[in-house]
Amino acid sequence: MAGGDRLVTRMAVVWCPDWPVVAWGIPLDEPVVVVVGNRVVASSPAARAEGVALGQRRRDAQGRCPDVAVLERDIDREARLFEPVAAALEAITPRVEISGPGLVGFPTRGPSRFFGGDAEMVNRVLADVAPVLAGRGDVRVGVADGIFAAKLAARSTKARLGGAIVVPPGESPSFLAGFPINTLEPLALTDVLGRLGLSTLGAFASMSAADVLGRFGREGQLAHRLARGEDDHPPDLRRPAPDLAVTWMFEPSADRVDRCAFAAKALADELHAMLSSNGLACIRVAIEAETDDGEEHTRLWRHEGALSAAALAERARWQLDGWLGMAARRVESTDDPEADGSGRGIRRLTLIPDEVVPASGRQLGFWGGRAERADDVTRVVGRLQGLMGAEAVSVPEWRGGRGPADQIQLIPAAAVDLGEERVATGAAWITEPWPGQIPAPAPSKVLVDPHEVVLHDEAGRPVMVSGRGELSSAPHSVVSGKQRWLITAWTGPWPADERWWDPLTQRRRARLQVTLDDQSAHLLVIEQQAWFIEATY
Amino acid sequence: MAELALETPVLRRPALSAEIRQRIQPVTLSGQKVLPVPEILQPLFPWSGVQRGTSLGVSGHGSWALAMAILADALGAEGWLAVVGAPNLGLAAAAEFGVRLDRVLVVETPSAAQWPTVVASLLEAVDVVAIAPVGRVGPRDGRRLSARAREQESVLLHLDGARTWPTVVDVNLTTTVDGWEGLGDGHGHLRSRKVTVESTGRRSAARSATVSVLLPGPDGRLAPVVSPAEHHHSTLEIVRI
């Protein structure tokens, strides 16, 4: 096993735990959860102490911890507020690279030597970052060979404040060996490895690299490199030619983030198109901006997979937002009346692909052509939003619900990355059954405006549903205006008492399935003594 | 057309097995870029699938379910669908038929003036645009959009059976419900529906064809109609093996 032929970059990782909570400016000793689409994605330690866990449903979290505050995730805000942390690290090293809001790394070779060792450098990092956070959040540092080990080291720290773990040079493999296999990604791979009896990274690392590559392909090879404490950089990493950078000049200079966002989108599209025409994908990008007064800012952003055009644009937007936010705060904090904010606008924006890999071969469509499908679609969505308004295009996601109209919710396409996998679009997203749900098949037509009808029994009396969920008599016909259909078969009622705990939004409904003499089948719903056709099969 | 071409003397070669012919066909005949459809529906389509760049209409009770069953196969894992001006489309049902919801865009009903622009833009990026126009579509817009679909090799799916469309669509599928199964007099629930689908069309689809299917079948997807006798027969075969 020839593994040591590559030099592993020694990295430091600075991690701000619970950043989504910290970014909301809420003290960590209050119970808080941050949710995305009804699932908990972050929580404060106080909430975790009450039994709240990641991935829980909002309702379960509230059940565990009734006085928990629930906040929607605001990733733009997280990125903006993280910029001061990254800027503080710039005093230590120029090569700061952000993995995402809350997580930033840098190579330690230079700074470590300058400060006289890893431990001294870590102290310096803690001392520099703590004042930026001003006690609102926590900061942890991990130093190890390779960014993966460094990240795990940072995450393994226990101390409430100023925790740090320094893995001595060369000991990353033994440090990693004890971690469970599901520390790696993707889940599909670690699941198989776990079932093969490889329950720790150490066990996986002891496999031969050739066997792993043969059995699990590129994905397995990458995971194997990580488990062995080797650099996570793919072996075919290369530095791109400098002429691949793209630049946007602002005229006049931009001081608002929406103008920057527009430029970022255009640049990201251009860069992505250029890279993909060269068969490349970007895994680390440098974002460079020049302000009116000639100040230059650079920041690196990295991504485990390849950065899609949308992801590139998002990172550029976050970064510009962060810089503009810091400039605005500087102006506010000086008492100098001359500091009117001029000179803080952004004059130039440049995206430089810092590290690229051969594009992993998203298959061309069989009919020759639309490899960049998600990008095409995203572009058209952008055009339609410009034409019709931001909410005009939406994408479906599963939500649990009894009625056919509740099961799928449309969310604005602007809120998602169409190029990435979205869990809530699979029916498996809804894990628990909804009591009182109408059994499958689902109706193919769900009326946005239910159509009011009258239901008669054989004697021509209106059919109602009692408070105990029973029909007053067997339904015989459906009447709508002058039209009348005979009911050939029916079933129900399925009562649905929704939000009974809240007198304002409470809804009591009951549903019937009917087939009519014209062979159509419908779902009828009664609410407040009136029947409606809610859906048609 | 293409099948005729194979018969001409110029192209006559030693007979190929059916399997090989099927495999090489799409590569050799560029005019025949076809999105796959479920096998039982293949007789309805002139090229055994939805030809890219053409239009398809569906009408009748249960025709939206038919459209979903077709879309599930036609789009596969990678194809994109945009739905314009059909807010009533039951996406849960679409997912049950196998349409991938992460490849679906739902676009609000555009104003009459914007409608052609919106549909034309979508035809550039997605494989199938499902539409149900509210008002009549002018002949110029109709021609323009058909041309755009042809040039972008995407499919225009008329959820309203092209009622409001100025020209005839390439393939029109009309459904007739023969009956539902599963629902009784106050008990059971809707399970499966027997539907007869008739296809009409122009050019290569001019001959009409009829197919009977379960839409949905007992497992929620498109299924062949199994008569009790056939069912019996197949059981016997299994026993013999």
Image (spheres, rainbow, N blue to C red):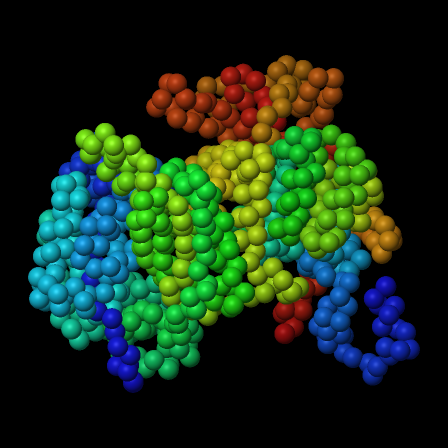
Residue most toward the top?
A: A461
- Toward which corner of the image does residue A301 lie, by quadrant? bottom left
Where is residue A448 drawn, in percent x and y? 58, 29
Left/right placement of residue A120 relative to residue A236 reads: left
Residue A182 in the image, given as x and y percentages of width and height: 29, 63
The quarter of the image holding the N terminus of chain A is bottom left
Total numbered labels: 0
Occupied quadrant, residue B78 = bottom right
The residue sitting at 27% across, 47% down in the picture is A83
Can you say whether A414 is above or below A199 in the image?
Answer: above
Closest to the observer, A144 or A326: A326
Q: Is residue A127 above or below residue A11?
A: above
A328, A265: nearer the viewer: A328
Residue B130 on image: x %, y %: 66, 43
User: What residue is rendered at 38% in x and 24% in y?
Assistant: A500
Residue B134's place in the image compared with A317, above or below, is above
Residue A255, above or below A486: below
Quadrant that contains the C terminus of chain A: top right
Q: Nearer the viewer, residue A341 or B239?
A: A341
Observer-nearest of A33 and A472: A33
Is B173 left, or right, of A522 in this rendering?
right
Q: Quadrant of residue B183?
A: top right
Residue B163 in sight here: no
